[in-house]
Amino acid sequence: MKIRVGFGYDVHQLVEGRELWLGGIRFDHPLGLLGHSDADVLIHAICDALLGAANMRDIGYHFPDNSEDFHGIDSKILLQKTVQLIATKGYRVGNVDATVCAERPKLKARIPEMQQCLADTMGIDADDVSIKATTTEKLGFTGREEGISAYATVLIEG
């Protein structure tokens, strides 16, 4: 069996007039993330990590932000398509370890829900999806609540 690891990172600006989606779950929050899709920063980081592990470039290459096909799309669909893409090279998701950096909203109570949603979307067990939340202690764009970022590391098996 061949195993590979990948790393992904994404960031989106917080703005008024948008829904906030993280890990496939909608959060009740006065600000949402700005993007061509639903701007789910966590899913985008996971997609980049999976594509990187399979040496298949990045999310922008496969799902460009200038394509109407992906305008307003649910990022769970992008994650499903990403899992299908890596499968064309004989890979499947082993596990995901991700961190979301946000001052607000507080994510801890909804992490199990996000884990289950992402696991269902990728066709893996929820125990294979680790999500952690942190703040930046009021430092930088995250600390000023101007945006949210996410990091993801994945293992894929072939």
Image (spheres, rainbow, N blue to C red):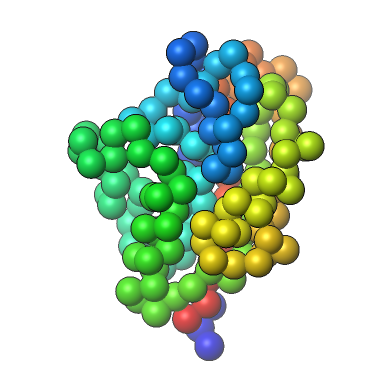
- In the displayed structure, 8 sits above or below 11; it is below
- In the displayed structure, 146 sits above or below 50; it is above
Determine the residue located farthest toward the right in the rendered image. 109
Q: Nearer the viewer, residue 80 or 132?
A: 80
The x, y position of residue 71, in whole percent, is: 29, 34
Q: Residue at x 21, y 36 (%)?
A: 68
Q: Nearer the viewer, residue 16 or 117?
A: 117
Q: How many marks?
A: 0
Q: Residue at x 66, y 54 (%)?
A: 116
- In the displayed structure, 35 sits above or below 5; it is above
Q: Is residue 6 visible?
A: no
Q: Is residue 66 found left or right of 73 in the rendered image?
A: left
The x, y position of residue 92, in whole percent, is: 49, 73
Q: Is residue 74 found left or right of 103 in the rendered image?
A: left
Q: Is residue 148 visible?
A: yes
The x, y position of residue 148, in whole percent, is: 57, 28
Q: Residue at x 39, y 73 (%)?
A: 87
Q: Nearer the viewer, residue 43 or 123?
A: 123
The x, y position of residue 147, in whole percent, is: 54, 22
Q: Is residue 19 found left or right of 109 in the rendered image?
A: left
Q: Residue at x 78, y 37 (%)?
A: 108
Q: Nearer the viewer, residue 151 or 79?
A: 79
